Every structure is written in structure tokens, then in C-alpha cells.
Image (cartoon, grey):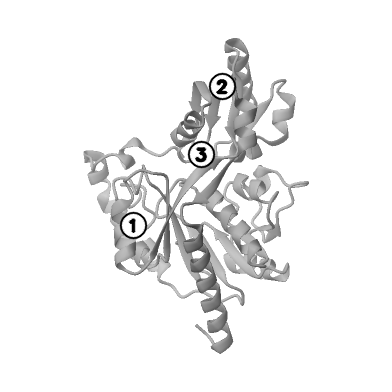
């Protein structure tokens, strides 16, 4: 779905009219979040959002994969497989699965780290453990109570924050904010904006960690676009952030197209993008996630679509390392001494 504009503006008449429905939705979500979870025998680290839409969970997950491997861990990512038809549990195999099977984000990540998709998280965790996972990284699922989480790292965009602060459908929140804050161990603030400062202060006050980070383009992606005028398109939670990242990297964005998050591109839409780019002498560029969703169809277009790869870089990586090591040690100590 495309996010309604009023979600990210001050409370409006539309959002107020939806508050009674939001109260019901929020109550159900809160009750569900407080259900007891199941321990799976290996530490579970959850990377989530307070709200619907994207804020940088996938780059955060991949950054954690890199650090965990440096610790000698064997991380396996566990995803619901949003947008895919398979219910799982199944190991994602990029050589035989497409985005329509397993979802765009799992497919993209599976080229760098083992990924399990499963609608039932307990079954997915069992498969991950059977594949030798020493740590399970949940990509999303913060509001899902199925598994006991040894740490919850919540990603928030510093320019968008939590929008108008209301629960769906009056706003973007997936559950009441106070409950979500109480279950947050670390807040990952992406970017240099101030919209998340109030949330960060609340996390600090309750003893949680605030980790600030930046999305940094891969040098090869910037080099590939140097000197070109581009048509940028994306079907992600915040396409404007993608365009802003391109421009801040010195890329000449001459035109742009925004689509809804996880948008399934049709052959007609892709042909139109190619025709527009050819007419105006532009190079097509999109996100890695979008290109994973387009899949083999990109090879038949007659014009290249270049991916713009980014990675998440933490301002204080030492602080993140200490947080991860502490949480892993706590989880293993608890498992050794008995049930949590």
C-alpha cells in the first residue's frame, strides 16, 4: 500500500475520525504483543520498526550480519517473506526462488547471508537452528510474540520519526507507542534529522541504547552513475529518501517515479520507464530491493537498470559491538542457568 500523506503531517480531521478504529486495532495489537513467546535455544535478535513502511531494517540487518561474523558467529536471518507466495519454512535459494516466491527483501539478503522465510516464526527458527545458526536475526517481527527476543533493535528514520504518532489506520504505528518503547533495547536512528530525537530521549531515559547511523552509498554504485543523468524509480517505504541519497552522492537525478512499497512492476510499467529514459537520454536506476523484485524481466528490457547499493554505517560502532556482545552473553547465560 502507499502510505497516506496525513500519516506524516500534524494530526488532521481525517486522522481524528479514524481514532476509534485505531483504538480497537491498537488494543488488539497490544494484547497480542504481550503474549508469552517461545525460546528456541539460540539467541534471537530482532530488527524492527514501530510503524508500517520502511526505515532501513534490511541495511541494519546486513550490518549486524557483518559484525556477528566478525565475532565468529553464524547468523541466519528469519523473515516472514512478505510479498512471497511460499508459507515456509524454507531456506531461500536465489538460484531457484524469485521475489514472487519469497519476497524481495529475503531474496536480496540471501545473496549475502542464509535466509529462512516462514509465516510461523517458531517453525522458521527451528529450521534456522537446524542449519547451524548460532544467532537468529529476525528481519521485522517486533510486534510478533511467537519467539522470545533476546534483544530488540528498532530502526527509525531521523527525518520522518513516527509521523503523527497515531496507531493504524489513524497513523503509521503498528501498536501503541508506549508499549513498543517499553520493549525496545536499542534504537537505531538513521540520518541526521531531528524528528526522532524525542523518541531517542525516552529510550535513553529508560536505560536503552541509542545508536546513530547513516546510509552510505557503495562506491561502485556511485562510480557507475558518475557523469550520467538518471531516471530514479523505487517502490519502497520512502522513495523520497532514495532520491535524496542519490542527489547527496552527486548523482544527477533528472526524473523520478515513486511506487508503493513492494510494488509488483508490470511489463507495461517497465516498458514505459525504458521508453521514457531512452527518449530523454537518461539511465535507469533503482534500489537493490526493487531490482530483486523485477528479477529476470530486467534482462529482456533492452536497456540496463542499474542498482544503487547502500550500506548502513554506525557513528559509534564500538558501542554497537558492546551492545551485541552483552546481549549474546546474557542470552547464553540465561539458557545455561535455566528457563527465562
Task: Tell me the distance, in whole angstroms, between the alpha carbons under discs 3 and 1.
Answer: 24 Å
In the foreground, 125 or 60: 60
- Relative image position of residue 177 (x, y in whole percent): 32, 59
Residue 110 horizontal side relative to residue 7, left or right: right
**Mark count:** 3
Among the two numbered marks 3 and 1 on one chain, the one whose residue lies closer to the N terminus: 1
SS of the residue at dot 2? strand
Q: Residues within 10 Å of mark 3 (few under 14, many from 20)?
A: many
Residue 200 disc label: 1
Q: Residues within 10 Å of mark 2 (few under 14, many from 20)?
A: many
Residue 230 disc label: 2
In the foreground, 128 or 43: 43
Residue 194 horizontal side relative to residue 150, left or right: left
Based on the displayed image, in which of its 4 quarters is residue 130 positioned?
Answer: bottom right
- Relative image position of residue 123 (x, y in whole percent): 63, 67
Q: Residue at x 33, y 52 (%)?
A: 167
Q: Which residue is labeled 3 in the image?
A: 236
Do callouts 1 and 2 mark residues in contact (Cβ within 8 Å)? no
Q: Is residue 297 above or below residue 83?
A: above
Q: Is residue 135 above or below residue 191?
A: below
Based on the displayed image, in which of its 4 quarters is residue 191 positioned?
Answer: top left
SS of the residue at dot 3? loop
SS of the residue at dot 1? helix
- Relative image position of residue 252 (x, y in whole percent): 52, 22
Task: Tell me the distance, in whole angstroms, between the alpha carbons under discs 1 and 2.
Answer: 36 Å
Q: Residue at x 36, y 48 (%)?
A: 172
Among the two numbered marks 1 and 2 on one chain, the one whose residue lies closer to the N terminus: 1
- Relative image position of residue 282 (x, y in whole percent): 59, 17
Amino acid at each position: 500500500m502507499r502510505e497516506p500523506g496525513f500519516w506524516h503531517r500534524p494530526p488532521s480531521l481525517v486522522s481524528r475520525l479514524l481514532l476509534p478504529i485505531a483504538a480497537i486495532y491498537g488494543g488488539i495489537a497490544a494484547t497480542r504483543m504481550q503474549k508469552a513467546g517461545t525460546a528456541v535455544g539460540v539467541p534471537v535478535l530482532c530488527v524492527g520498526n514501530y510503524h508500517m513502511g520502511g526505515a532501513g531494517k534490511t541495511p541494519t540487518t546486513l550490518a549486524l550480519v557483518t559484525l556477528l561474523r566478525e565475532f565468529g558467529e553464524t547468523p541466519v536471518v528469519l523473515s516472514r517473506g512478505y510479498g512471497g507466495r511460499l508459507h515456509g519454512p524454507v531456506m531461500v535459494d536465489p538460484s531457484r526462488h524469485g521475489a514472487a516466491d519469497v519476497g524481495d527483501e529475503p531474496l536480496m539478503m540471501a545473496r549475502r547471508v542464509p535466509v529462512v522465510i516462514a509465516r510461523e516464526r517458531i517453525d522458521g527458527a527451528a529450521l534456522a537452528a537446524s542449519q547451524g545458526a548460532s544467532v537468529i536475526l529476525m528481519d521485522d517481527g517486533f510486534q510478533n510474540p511467537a519467539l522470545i527476543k533476546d534483544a530488540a533493535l528498532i530502526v527509525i528514520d531521523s527525518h520522518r520519526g513516527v509521523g503523527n504518532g497515531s496507531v493504524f489506520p489513524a497513523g503509521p504505528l503498528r501498536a501503541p507507542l508506549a508499549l513498543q518503547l517499553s520493549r525496545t533495547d536499542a534504537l537505531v536512528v538513521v540520518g541526521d534529522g531531528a524528528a526522532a530525537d524525542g523518541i531517542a530521549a525516552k529510550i535513553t531515559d529508560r536505560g536503552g541504547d541509542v545508536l546513530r547511523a547513516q546510509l552510505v552509498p557503495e562506491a561502485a554504485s556511485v562510480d557507475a552513475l558518475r557523469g550520467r543523468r538518471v531516471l530514479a524509480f523505487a517502490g519502497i517505504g520512502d522513495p523520497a529518501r532514495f532520491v535524496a541519497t542519490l542527489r547527496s552522492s552527486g548523482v544527477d537525478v533528472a526524473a523520478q517515479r515513486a511506487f508503493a512499497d513492494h510494488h509488483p512492476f508490470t511489463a507495461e510499467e517497465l516498458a514505459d520507464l525504458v521508453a521514457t529514459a531512452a527518449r530523454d537520454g537518461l539511465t535507469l536506476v533503482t534500489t537493490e530491493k526493487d531490482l530483486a523484485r523485477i528479477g529476470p524481466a530486467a534482462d529482456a528490457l533492452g536497456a540496463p537498470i542499474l542498482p544503487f547499493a547502500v550500506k548502513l554505517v554506525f557513528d559509534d560502532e564500538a558501542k554497537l559491538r558492546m551492545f551485541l556482545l552483552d546481549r549474546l552473553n546474557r542470552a547464553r547465560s540465561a539458557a545455561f542457568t535455566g528457563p527465562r
